Image (cartoon, grey):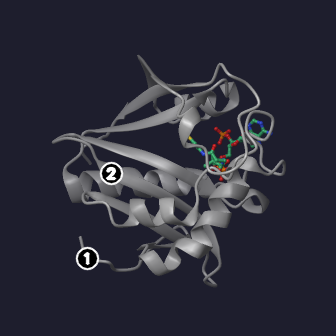
Amino acid sequence: MADSTASYSGLRFRIATPDDAPQLQPLVKSAYRDRGGWTTEADMLTDDRIDIDGVIGKIVTPDTVVLFITDDIGTLVACCELAKRSTDLAYLGMFAVDPHRQGSGIGNHVLAYVEAYCRRTWGAKRLEISVTWPRPELSRWYSRRGFRETGETRPFPYSDLAEGEALRDDLYFVIMEKELSTE
Ligand SMILES: CC(C)(COP(=O)(O)OP(=O)(O)OC[C@H]1O[C@@H](n2cnc3c(N)ncnc32)[C@H](O)[C@@H]1OP(=O)(O)O)[C@@H](O)C(=O)NCCC(=O)NCCS
C-alpha cells in the first residue's frame, strides 16, 4: 500500500516513517500513562509504555504499519500500529488518542478507518487487539464496537518495561477479536 495521505471524518492518515518516532512516542506515553485520559493505566504502571527505538522498531517491521493521524490543521491527534498476523488476521496495537482529545469520537473514527485499511490492504477478515487486565471500561468500549473476548490471555511483558515500573504483579493481556465485514 502506498504511503499516501487519506482523509476520513476530518482526520488525515498517513504511514509513519522513522523520523516521526520522536513525535509519536510522547503521544503514546501520554495516552496510556497521563491521568487526563478516561482509560489511563497510571494506577498500574509508571513506565513510558514504549521508547523511541521501540516505535522505530514497529515502523520498520515488515507487514506492519504505524499510522500517523492528524486533525485538519495537521496536529498529531492519534496513532496506532497495524500488523498482518496471518492470511486473514490483522492486529491493532499502540492505539493512542491525545488525552486532551479523547472522548470526542476520534478513537471511533480511527477504528473504522483501521478496519477498512486491514480489509483493503491485507484482505483481513478478523482484527485482534490485546487489552491489559483489568481495564473493564476499555473492554466495554471494544465490546460496543463488535469485539469479543476469544478466551485467550497472554503474559504481561514485565521484563520489557521502558523505564519506570509496574505497580502490581497480576497484569496480563486479554485477547479480543472482531469479524470484519466484507463491505
Ligand atoms: C481507547 C482510546 C483509543 C479511545 O479513543 P477515544 O477518542 O477516547 O474514543 P471515542 O471518543 O471515539 O469514544 C468515546 C467513548 O468513550 C466513552 N467514554 C468517554 N469518557 C468515558 C469515561 N470517563 N468512562 C467510560 N467511558 C467513557 C464514551 O461513552 C464513548 O463510548 P460510546 O461511543 O460507546 O458511547 C483512547 O481513549 C486512548 O487513547 N486510550 C489510552 C490508550 C489505550 O488504552 N489504548 C487502547 C489499548 S487496547
Tag shown at residue 83: 2
Foreground residue among 176 and 105:
176
Which quadrant would residue 18 be assigned to in this image?
A: bottom left
- Residue 124 in percent (x, y) is at 24, 45
- Residue 179 in percent (x, y) is at 32, 33
* Circle 1 residue: 2
Query: Cβ of disc 1 within 8 Å of ligand 1?
Result: no
- Pointer 2 local density, CA inside 10 Å: few below 14, some 14–19, many at least 20: many
Name the amino acid type tagged 1. Ala
Residue 130 higher or lower than 14, as above or below:
above
- Pointer 1 local density, CA inside 10 Å: few below 14, some 14–19, many at least 20: few
Q: Mark 1 or mark 2, which is nearer to you?
A: 2
The residue depicted at 83 percent of the width and 51 percent of the height is: 36
The residue depicted at 75 percent of the width and 42 percent of the height is: 40
Quadrant of the frame with the N terminus? bottom left
- Residue 50 in percent (x, y) is at 58, 54
Residue 6 higher or lower than 25, as above or below:
below
